[in-house]
Image (tube, grey):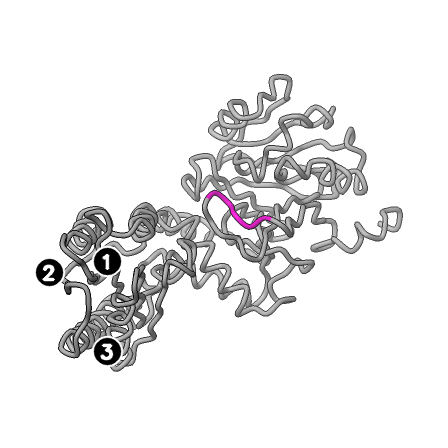
């Protein structure tokens, strides 16, 4: 290993396995996801008799990626390039550069090959199509393949190396996090777990059933390291925390005694009612979160509704319906199925057309499939009164109790 440049030595994850990925310090929007702390596109090089690369990176960083690999091994000596997923952040560098791996075979599932060809051409590539029964020998190591469809594309796959007990998890176990560290336990683990939950809510939110199946398959092999394609990777106690969070989420047991209110307000009256409602919810012992859409975003809405035991959405009427930011937030959580079955409440002001709350109720009930237990909600003309604030407080008490009941109903069985 002494022949490798020092900067490559520094990127060794475990003996013979190197990080050759990219840290994207600047990305702040990732198809609608607000990536406040950047991201990374992780790729790995396995130094064995058949030198192997796991996954690619996003196209603007192709040259940096290739240079990192070349520092480990000449590109024409690479024998295999394993592709776990065809999405652009993990594969788009291949479009103009796959031919530089002149003697490499591209290894993936049939579905992944289909996607790679559609997206990037790769007409002259040499392919090896694998499935869950295939074992690829690369020297002293072997690679096995665990298809995990819809985590989060139909082509998604985990690759497992039994000799090193590594699970190359691609989008699984990821976070959008730009850092010079490579392992979760080298960072503030509580902060990594916060980003992990945010990523889970925003990227994998609607695929809990698929994660349950993936965990069942993964439990049949011994895993010492999880090398993800975004953010930091996992080992030791930190890995246990990530697996436990996925396990709870996949079983619907991840919610906290927590009430989140998502609102927009024109002149502050709906906001004031929200504060009263949150006071009521807090009196029950629940954690409370207020997301004002003038200063928050749908990424945080997903993060907080993900583990809330109950939610409320509030808006004054504008142009005979709810505020556009609330419509966007509801549309987002509906697609991610984050509040399905959870207690949900609606309230808001109006001037002469009382339409916002009925429209919110309809979207919560019919679109998000939430438990809208009071379809009238609270509506008020222009301004609140002391009586209305008391009504909002009592509604918060009720919502808090329902959040607690929901969490207790779905808690792990002792």
Above or below, 75 against 293 in this view is above
- Whichever of labels 1 and 2 marks the residue nearer the N terminus, that label is 1
| Residue matched to label 2 | 376
How far, Cα to Cα, is label 2 from label 3? Answer: 19 Å
| Residue matched to label 3 | 280
How far, Cα to Cα, is label 1 from label 2? Answer: 15 Å
- Are there few (<14), some (14-19), or many (20+) residues within 10 Å of tag 3? many
| Residue matched to label 1 | 316
Furthest-top residue in this view: 123
Question: In the rendering, at what x and y percent does residue 182 appear?
Answer: 66, 58
Which segment did they paint magenta? 27-31
Does the rendering let one see residue 345? no
Question: In the rendering, at what x and y percent does residue 273 appear?
Answer: 24, 71
Whether residue 28 appears in magenta in the rendering, the answer is: yes
SS at circle 3:
helix
- Taking 311 as reference, is 146 left or right? right
Above or below, 84 against 377 in this view is above
């Amino acid at each position: 290993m002494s022949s490798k440049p020092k900067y490559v030595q520094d990127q060794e994850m475990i003996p013979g396995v190197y990080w050759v990925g990219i840290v994207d310090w600047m990305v702040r929007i990732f198809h609608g996801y607000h990536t406040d702390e950047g991201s990374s596109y992780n790729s790995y090089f396995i130094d064995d008799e058949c030198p192997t690369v796991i996954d690619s990176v996003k196209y603007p960083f192709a040259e940096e990626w290739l240079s990192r690999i070349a520092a480990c091994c000449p590109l024409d000596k690479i024998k295999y390039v394993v592709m776990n997923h065809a999405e652009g952040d993990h594969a788009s560098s291949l479009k103009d550069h796959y031919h530089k791996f002149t003697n490499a075979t591209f290894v993936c599932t049939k579905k992944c090959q289909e996607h790679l060809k559609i997206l990037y051409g790769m007409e002259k590539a040499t392919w090896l199509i694998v499935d869950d029964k295939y074992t690829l020998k690369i020297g002293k190591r072997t690679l096995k393949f665990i298809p995990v469809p819809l985590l989060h594309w139909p082509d998604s796959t985990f690759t497992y190396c039994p000799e090193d007990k590594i699970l190359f998890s691609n989008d699984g176990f990821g976070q959008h996090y730009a850092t010079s560290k490579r392992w979760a336990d080298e960072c503030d683990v509580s902060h990594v777990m916060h980003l992990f939950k945010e990523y889970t809510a925003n990227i994998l939110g609607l695929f809990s059933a698929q994660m349950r199946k993936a965990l069942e398959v993964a439990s049949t092999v011994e895993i010492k390291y999880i090398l993800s394609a975004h953010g930091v990777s996992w080992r030791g106690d930190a890995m246990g925390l990530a697996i436990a969070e996925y396990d709870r989420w996949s079983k619907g047991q991840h919610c906290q005694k927590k009430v989140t209110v998502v609102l927009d307000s024109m002149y502050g009256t709906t906001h004031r009612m929200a504060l009263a409602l949150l006071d009521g919810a807090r009196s029950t012992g629940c954690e409370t979160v207020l997301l004002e859409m003038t200063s928050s975003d749908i990424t945080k809405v997903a993060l907080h509704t993900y583990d809330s035991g109950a939610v409320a959405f509030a808006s004054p009427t504008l142009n005979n319906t709810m505020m556009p930011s609330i419509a966007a937030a509801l549309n987002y959580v509906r697609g991610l199925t984050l509040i399905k079955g959870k207690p949900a409440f609606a309230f808001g002001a109006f001037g002469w057309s009382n339409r916002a709350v009925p429209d919110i109720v309809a979207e919560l009930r019919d679109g998000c499939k939430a438990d809208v237990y009071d379809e009238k909600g609270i509506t008020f003309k222009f301004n609140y009164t002391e009586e209305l604030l008391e009504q909002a407080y009592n509604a918060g008490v009720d919502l808090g109790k329902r959040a607690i009941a929901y969490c207790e109903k779905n808690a792990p069985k002792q």
